[in-house]
Image (cartoon, rainbow, N blue to C red):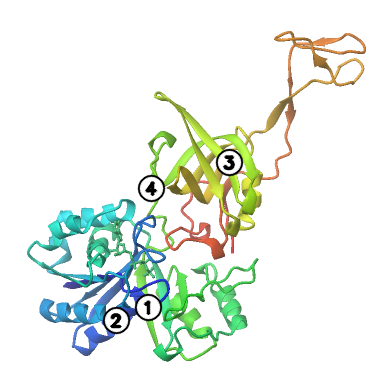
Amino acid sequence: MTVIGIDDTDSRTAGMCTTYAGARLVERVEDAGGRVERALLVRLNPAVEHKTRGNGAVAIHCTLPPDRAFELAEDALSLAVEGERTSPGGVVWSGSLTDLPAAAMNFSRAAIHEELAIADAARIFDRPGFRATGRQKGRGRIGALAAVGAWAAFEAEWDWSYECLSYRPPDRWGTDRVVDEASVFSAAAEAYPTVWDTVDRAAGEAVCVPHTPGPVLYGIRGDEPDAVCAVADAIDGEPVARRQLYVTNQGTDAHLQSAMVSEVVNGGAYRLTATVTVPPETREGGHVFFTVGEESTTGEADLRCVAFEPTKRFRDQVRALRVGDRVTVCGEVGDGTLKLEKFALREPVQAELVTPDCPECGRSMSSAGRAAGYRCRDCGTTAPGRVERPLDRAIEPGWYEVPPRARRHVARPLIRGGFDAPTHPER
Ligand code: ATP
């Protein structure tokens, strides 16, 4: 087995896409007489500074001899756009996947959650069995190595999904895409829920069609390879120059780590359970903030959470939270704030403490002084303290998520299942 990893071939402004370089690579491998066993698209730590968009890297598992594979890796990197921020890299491993050093698998694990350096990768790709190549600083060797180790590290652990990517001919890159939206919506409806995040029904948006200048015409994601390809086939539009099916950790929540509030650091992505301590507040720009807290043996810790404006209707569910609600929140932490991707309402507060009404005359009672309970000004009746009033909650317990249009590549849509409470999927 030979595994060819590549990364960092694109730029935000000049277009290109590492998945396109991967699709070309698959074709070259086959032209050279190799058999491609699988093409992986691995989403790495979404918080890394140098990412263009979704921090994706590609690995091609094939039967080509390593020398030829290395030539083709270099060839694939020649597709990379020129630019200050583009730093292409490729890593080739030859040998059985079971012989892949544990250090390479650990590197893949770390690349999902941590920020790594080229020197960390070099300690592994300088070993026998690996070859690495890079242009500019060759930073892409980090993602390329992580992609090379991903299958051995996560084959059994991740609930891998599929994406069928359709690409435009190069002479159309940067021009408006011509895709028949009605065909997208009807194919998406037919294949749902096996195929997900093709459209955002509530927003009326075909989210599978990007707006960036790159080569992708549309990308169809789902649980089964045949189903994602069938949806791609059913979409009408401009000519498709090539197509590539990837096995991917998109839609898996691979980035989330379980943690306590006190353990959270900037740059990590977490799943943590705590209690709402500051109620939701909509601030300038439409972003909704609230705070969760947790008491532990080391004291109290709290964490601000935010549902950004582009998460649209998700903010209504966030606004329905109340102080005292027990919740699990998921998302990446930056600047001390967790950017919500989804949350579960575990134990909603069911009652609030209010000033009692007089049991004799029905008027609202007044405080009788500090720790002295309440007293009715009209008839003198007293009451020992505040009373519980049941709350009519506008939200049911369970999981809530951002709509498809605001979903991160790696975030697991609720419709994929595997959650520990009832789900309220967005589609
Ligand atoms: P696209 O999604 O369009 O393919 P991208 O978001 O994947 O673009 P890249 O251009 O590939 O962005 O840039 C990501 C860079 O970060 C690459 O050089 C990659 O090697 C590097 N990288 C990936 N994971 C890590 C990590 N955990 N620590 C440090 N660097 C990383």
Other residues around mark 2 within 10 Å, as few (<14) / some (14–19) / many (≥20): some
Q: Where's residue 13, x and y in %?
A: 42, 74
Give the label, 4 or 1, closer to the camera. 1
| Horizontal arrangement in the rendering, residue 222 relative to residue 106 (left or right) | right
Q: Which mark is residue 268?
A: 4
Q: Are marks 2 and 1 in contact (CB under 8 Å)?
A: yes
x 22%, y 83%: residue: 29
Image position of 187 with respect to 162: above or below: below
Q: Are marks 4 and 2 in contact (CB under 8 Å)?
A: no
Amino acid at pointer 4: Gly
> Badge 3 is on which residue?
290
> Helix, strand or loop at disc 4?
loop
Amino acid at pointer 2: Leu
> Badge 2 is on which residue?
79
Q: Where's residue 363, x and y in %?
A: 89, 20
Single out the residue that lies furthest toward the left. 128
Q: Which mark is residue 16?
A: 1
> Helix, strand or loop at disc 3?
strand
Q: Earlier in the sequence, mark 3 or mark 4?
A: 4
Q: Earlier in the sequence, mark 2 or mark 1?
A: 1
Q: Quadrant of residue 202?
A: bottom right
Q: Earlier in the sequence, mark 3 or mark 2?
A: 2
Give the alpha-carbon distance from disc 4 to disc 2, as whole Å. 32 Å
| Horizontal arrangement in the rendering, residue 291 relative to residue 148 (left or right) | right
| Horizontal arrangement in the rendering, residue 392 relative to residue 214 (left or right) | right
Give the alpha-carbon distance from disc 3 to disc 2, as whole Å. 45 Å
Q: Are marks 3 and 4 in contact (CB under 8 Å)?
A: no
User: Is residue 396 visible to us here?
Assistant: no
Q: Are marks 4 and 1 in contact (CB under 8 Å)?
A: no
Q: Is mark 4 within 8 Å of ligand 1?
A: no
> Helix, strand or loop at disc 1?
loop
